Image: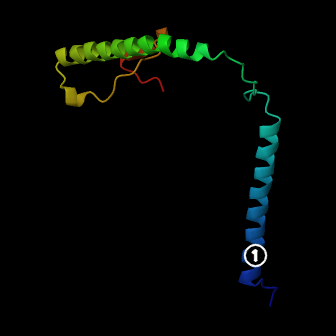
Amino acid sequence: MGSELNPWVFMLINMFIVFFVLIMLWVLMTIIRLVDPTGKKKSSPKPVAKAAPAAAAAAAAPAATSTASDNDEVVAVITAAVAAMGYSSSQIASIRPAKNTGWTAAARLSGVDNY
């Protein structure tokens, strides 16, 4: 008879290999994260006067409301245009801005997916 390997020993050897590879991948990811040149650099927070945040918040409030109302108006116009084409509002899944390039527009006109 040949040398037969006990199934428990075989299982332990395989588990050791799997966990060793996982640990090495973890070490490699940690090293990459430490030396990553594309990572965000931590910048020190800039000191701001105490009156400036209140003024900035007051100035930002009207801008935020106008942006929200502009988006609501755009959504309403797009929904009305799609409904005018014969679709119901339940058929509209989502409205999102498209990145229109010449190739994208040509593909849409020809009915070809550009994935």
Q: Examine the rendered structure and indicate whether residue 55 appears above or below residue 16.
A: above
Residue neighbourhood size for the residue with mark 1, other residues' Cα within 10 Å, grouped as few (<14), some (14–19), many (≥20): few
Residue sitting nearer the eye, 61 or 55: 55
The kind of residue tagged 1 is: Leu
**Residue at point 26%, 12% (across, down):** 77
Let me know if residue 39 appears in the view.
yes
The residue positioned farthest toward the bottom in the image shown: 1
Q: Quadrant of residue 83?
A: top left
Nearest the viewer among 98 and 14 is 98
| Residue 56 relative to residue 110: left or right | right
Tally of numbered tags: 1
Residue 62 % position (x, y): 42, 11
Q: Relative to 113, say whether 9 is above or below.
A: below
Q: In which image quadrant can residue 85 be found?
A: top left
Check the image and tell me how it is coloured.
rainbow
Residue 71 in the image, given as x and y percentages of width and height = 36, 15
Circle 1 residue: 12
- What SS does tag 1 mark? helix
Viewer-side residue, 48 vs 30: 48
Q: Quadrant of the N terminus?
A: bottom right
Residue 71 shown left or right of residue 83 in the figure:
right
Image coordinates of residue 76 in percent, x first then y, are: 26, 16
Res. 109 visible in picture: no
Q: What residue appears at the point 71 percent right and 19 percent down from the top-left corner? A: 47
Figure quadrant of residue 95: top left
Residue 57: percent from left, percent from top: 51, 16
Most distant residue in the front direction: 51
Front residue of 72 and 97: 72
| Residue shown at 25% from the left, 18% from the top | 79
